[in-house]
Image (cartoon, rainbow, N blue to C red):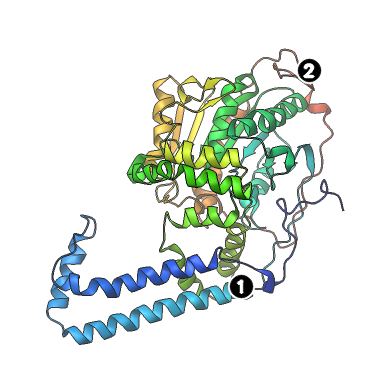
Amino acid sequence: MTRDSFSPSASSPPQPASARPGPRPLALHLNSALTILQGSLAALPSSRLGLIAWSASVRPQAESLAADLASSPPDAVARALAAEVAARYRAMLEGIRLYRAHPYVRDLEPAPTVWRAGGTRLTDYGGDGPPVLFVPSLVNRGYVLDLSARRSLLRWLATQGFRPYLVDWDAPTEAERGLDLGGYVMQRLVPALEHLAFEHGGPLPVVGYCMGGDLALALALVRPQAVAALALLATPWDFHAEGGAGRGRLLVAGRDGIDASLRLGGEMPVDALQAFFLGLDPALSLKKFAAFAAMDQAGEAAADFVALEDWLNDGVPLVPGVARDCLVGWYGENVTARLGWHVDGRAVDPAALTCPLLLAVPANDRIVPPGSARALGSRAAAGGVAVTEIAPPLGHIGMVVGGRAAARLWQPLADWLRLHAAVQNPPLSVTPAGSYRGGGRSQSKNKRPKRPPRTASQEFPT
């Protein structure tokens, strides 16, 4: 079977439960949870003495707790706390055991490949209607937008009068080893966009998710004539917003260590990336695996959990240039918000956009704080860009695959795309192997690959 007909990143092959490696890195997840729980035991004496400086958001609960502690026997409180700590850790361990043994496998029919450069491919989800290009993050695989039969934004859009295409970065090959973020934009996204603009006869909407939104923004700036509209979903811009400056200073201070690691290993490994994101919410694994242990393991909620967790653990490494740009440039020095990130010799500035912009800012996002994403919209609006914002009351990932994703994101996104996909610039001239300048092959004459077949049991959430 060739890579054109099958790719793990498009539709991961069925894996036996015994092969499930997550959560990755397991030792760090266990140690993080244990440290948090042991911290509760260590903090008990200080809490009884009122020596802990609580944040304003939890101060009322802390004062109520202090009153309860003062009226309870110290030894009894210590025993009860130790028992609760042990119970929570056991619940997390049981959740991990159940996750690793769960029978779920992802068995969606892969979307066909229509274009390729190096390790990057463009996959076509079919459908009758205007094309839409989706740009996912480089950090995690793009099939979060096609997670399962019931949780696939792309397959749903194909039933709603659109023809979605997904950029599948896959694992980097030797052809990508020398690329930085700008290189991925110019050598991967630009040719993919120009291919679609030529095939469909005009500019098309582009949708970016997470850091893929930053890449999509740069794409819209370097090829404005090929982008009809831009939608950015949970896209970070001000990496120092809402407490990110402290983390940024640590990353800048650790630049030499990051460089040494990249020289030694030749890439940023998946487990190192997972450790970084675990640091954004160290208690998450403790909570989510304990909750999973309480689920009906034969139910849809458990299958959805496993599908998402499998995706989270199915990451790819970053090449050195991308790792430096992300960790030191974006997170560390905040070059995006400072307009210091340059692609193709020009600053990536949202104010310079020439197309409408949709900003989806999930209100409960712990990975991209709302203030970070809204800074992009504010900058674009200051330049006169027509900005529409939606704020789903969901998290970073739940916004695209959660139970309320269809109502809170999928439908509003489809409505906005339907409005702007019909607005096309007048066709000019095209050279299929060169730079797109508008126009192109008539859409009505395209040979369209069939939409990936839906299984008999496939249903989309409503």
What percent of the width, then of the height, locates residue 186?
Answer: 65, 28
Q: Looking at this rendering, what residue extends furthest in the top direction?
A: 428
Are circles 2 and 1 on residues that touch, CB within 8 Å? no
Is residue 65 among the parts visible in the rendering?
A: no
Q: Residue furthest right?
A: 1
Q: Position of residue 429 (x, y in %)?
A: 74, 13
Numbered tag placed on residue 288 in the rendering = none
Tell me the distance, in whole angstroms, between the alpha carbons under discs 2 and 1: 51 Å
Place residue 249 in its image quadrant: top left
Is residue 158 positioned above or below 85 on the image?
above
Q: Give the camera-side residue of 448 and 398.
A: 398
Kind of residue at badge 2: Thr
- Residue identifier under label 1: 100
Q: Position of residue 51 (x, y in %)?
A: 15, 65
Name the image quarter holding residue 89.
Answer: bottom left
Q: Using the image, tell me which numbered label, if any, was put on residue 431.
A: 2
Q: Quadrant of the C terminus?
A: bottom right
- Report the amino acid beneath label 1: Arg
Of the image marks 2 and 1, the number of the one nearer the N terminus = 1
Looking at the image, is 395 positioned above or below residue 61?
Answer: above
